Image (tube, helix red, strand yellow):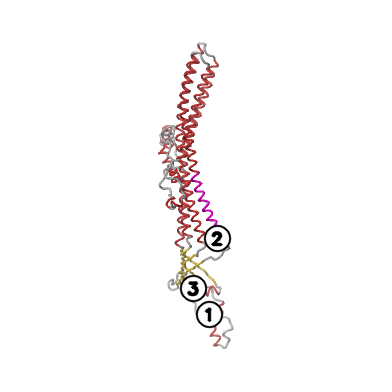
Amino acid sequence: MFVKRAFLLLIITLPLFAGVKHLTLNHAINILKKDNLELKVARFNEQMKAYEAKAAKGHNYGKLDVTLMGMRSNDAGNVFGFKLQSREANFGDFGAQEFFENFNAGRDPFTPPPSRLNYPKARNHFQTKFSYMLPLYTGGKLTEYGHITNSLYHMSKFDTKKLLNEKIFQTKKAFYDISLVEHYITNLSKIIRNIGKLESIVRNMQKEGYAKNIDLLEVQARKAEAQSMYNQAKLNKDLAYQFLSFLLNTEVSSIKRMNDTAPMPRVTKNSLESNNIDIQKALLGLQITKMAVNVEKANFLPTVGAFAEYSSADNVLWNEFLDKDAYTVGVQVKWNLFNGGIDAANLEKAKVHYLMVNDQVELAKKGIALKAKKLKTEILSANADIQSYKKQLRFAKKVYENYRARYKEGMVSISDVLIKQSKELEVLLKSLTAKNTRNTKIFELEALINKQKSASVYNVEKIVKPTETNSTITKGEKI
């Protein structure tokens, strides 16, 4: 009975540990966008920047506070102030009664201090106050701060998009690496089978006295070497699957095999300038520095603010609230006329920073274009190498087969046969390396032109005028 229960429990839990099978690249990218942990962290950062932008915008609407105070004091100034705020002060508080008592009694009414005013009884005081302060004019400083924080939010979206491109690059590379290593394993299996056939030939020839034991040992050593390469390739494939599972935050058991070589993307200077994330970030950074100049200019302008207060006070909480209420309204204008030239220096510094970032934008455009040209050149070079290795591999296979046949006839030694077989392995490895290099450069180029462009990415052109980009790139011009 226990065995049946354990078996049933194992069957139930098996799906929990089973990985995704026959995963396609498009499906993997969709999983990546949704489940990758680094992307989730980046999106949290986006949300925080969005709330910072919202908080900056809130400063335009002023600030409303409510204050509730409860006090008790026998300090003469406090008690008299409490009575005034409660609208309960009378002439007796000023010593009028004591004045007339001394006057009627024939005593000096002016010299004795009024004890009721100087030594009052302790009094409770409760005040409820509503205060509202509103900035009417800040020289544009609040508006620019709002624009800056909003731009920083969109900058964080660029950062997330760049991270997504990096993860898509890694996912594509993992898919093609797995496909390449599977192709390599298939070819290694054929080579191992061919070495096995050669081993059988040597054994038969040894029985007939035409081969020595050293020939058999040499073939077996080569077979062990090829088997070691086969096992290493399988371990590399398992490692690639583990990395892919880490990227997707999902266990992957198998993928749909890709072609050996990724397709070449079309790249133009216009597509680079329009889509490259580093250039878009640089353009947005240029706009932020321009906003910073406007912030410094605002220091030369006055600031105007309004305030209003409404309150009510009494010695009993909320007693006769409307009968004892009061209000205060006002406007304040503040204008700094001189601060030792600090504002002027900060303004000039902001202008220089803007000019520096403007040159950095142009440098970014030229640098990205140069990098794209370099990648394209390396891809074309790898294409030529791959074509060459294909021909060399076909030739090496034919030569090996020819030498194996000649060995059976006693025309060449087993060492000669194995040397030709080694050449086949060498060319196979070089072909695999060239294909891997080519695919890596392809994916780098795709990331460079932001091939996975999303509509959610902030469009810098909305705030950058064409005349401000200083672009000299012709639309559609190829690199």
Q: Which residues are magenta?
A: 348-366
**Quadrant location of the N terminus in the rendered image:** top left
Q: Disc 1 versus disc 2: distance between alpha carbons?
A: 56 Å
Per the rendering, the mark at residue 431 is none
Residue labelled with disc 1:
94
Magenta stretch: dominant secondary structure: helix
Circle 1 SS class:
helix
Q: Nearer the viewer, mark 2 or mark 3?
A: 2
Reply above or below: 446 against 53: above
Upstream in the sequence, badge 2 or badge 3? 3
How packed mark 2 is, by other alpha carbons closer than 10 Å (few <14, some 14-19, many 20 or more), is some
Residue labelled with disc 3:
85
Residue labelled with disc 2:
344
Residue at image position (52%, 79%) is 93
Residue placed most toward the observer, 168 or 70: 168
Looking at the image, do the residues carrying marks 2 and 3 touch, with CB atoms under 8 Å apart? Answer: no
Q: Is residue 349 magenta?
A: yes
Q: Disc 2 versus disc 3: distance between alpha carbons?
A: 47 Å
